[in-house]
Each structure stands twice: as structure tokens, then as C-alpha cells.
Amino acid sequence: DTIGFYAQPNEDGEFEGVVMIHEWWGLNEHIKEQAKILASHGYRVLAVDLFNSVAENREQAMTQVQSLDQQVALENMSSAIEYLKSRGSTKVASLGWCFGGAQSLQVSLNQNLDATIIYYGNLVTDSQQLSGLKSPVLGIFGDEDTSIPVENVNQFESELNNLNIQNDINIYQGVGHA
């Protein structure tokens, strides 16, 4: 009983899947456009809707994040994984921005995915929690992002390395949040 936005390439063929997770604004037109763009590059994309609403201002966005039921969100993302597999995707990745970046990591900690992509999302740095991660991680961050300090990103990368989890963590100089 969840909704989302599905996009796939225009031609027939075998395509891997991506669970796309929105920012704190919700599943807005920007995220739908990103799903279409990624699909045009040869992926099945299911952009989940974890709020069932789109915020119009920061206060609404914050309320959405604070009222999130993490278990329900994980069930939603798990359903998205199953949907992509039912469409023929043999490999599935998670990808998200900010709030969605954190959720991309969360779903990967709870499901066996083939890749985890985090665009400046809040991170888990506890090695015990991270030890369940099975997929390689691509992380993209800015060194001037005040909400996700570089120290946290470095600790995250260090823990991934200690656990021998393949990763490519990028911290871009002179870049803030988003």
C-alpha cells in the first residue's frame, strides 16, 4: 500500500534496479526527473515516497523527517527492492540525497543490496552496525557541509576500511550541503 515513481529505459532489455530515495522535501518533481534521467542511462528506477507528501517549506520538511517511522520506511524500501526484482532486475542498488542518503545506508544495513550510494546523508559510524553492510559504498560529500562534518565522513570511511567493505568516499573541497 505504498506509492512511488517508476521509470525504466524506453527499449527492451535486461536492466539493473535502483531504489531512489528523496530528500527531506519528499517525492517531488525534481526527484521524479532524476529517476527519468537515471532510467535513460539503462536502469529501472523506483523512487520511493517515504512521506506521502511534499513539503513546501523547511518547517514542513523537518516535521516530515521527525515523524518518520523508520520501520515503515524500511518496509517501503524493501517493497521497492522486491518490485524491481519482480521486473527482472538481478542487481539492485540504493541511492539517496541528504535524508535519502541516510536512508540509502539504512536500507543497505538491513537488506543485501549490490551497491549503496550516499549523497551527503547522515552516517552510521558504529563498526558493529556497519558490519552487516554487504555492498560497496559510494559516498559524495562536501567539506563545507555543516550538517555532515568531514570528521564523521572520515570516521565512516575508516570504519568501512577496517571492515574491508569496498568504498569510494569523495569529499569535495569548497562544497557545502547539496
Image: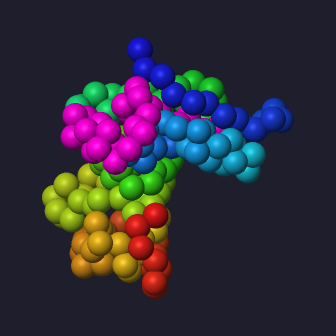
State how the image is colored.
Answer: rainbow
Report x, y in % for residue 170.
46, 76
Outermost residue, right direction? 11
Report x, y in % for residue 125.
21, 65
Q: Is residue 172 visible?
A: yes
Q: Quadrant of the N terminus?
A: top left
- Highlighted magenta segment, given as a residue range: 42-68
Front one among 92 and 178: 178
Residue at 41% x, 73% y is 176
Residue 63 appears left or right of 78: left
Residue 8 appears left or right of 22: right
Outermost residue, bottom direction? 173
Say how many tags the image has. 0
| Residue 31, magenta (yes or no) | no
Question: From what the image shows, is residue 75 above or below residue 113?
Answer: above
Report x, y in % for residue 131.
24, 58
| Residue 60, magenta (yes or no) | yes
Report x, y in % for residue 119.
45, 61
Question: From what the image shows, is residue 16 above or below residue 162?
Answer: above
Residue at 46% x, 68% y is 140
Front one among 52 and 96: 52
Question: From what the image shows, is residue 123 above or below residue 65?
Answer: below
Residue 95 appears left or right of 134: right
Front one among 59 and 136: 59
Question: From what the image shows, is residue 124 above or below residue 88?
Answer: below
Q: Is residue 166 visible?
A: no
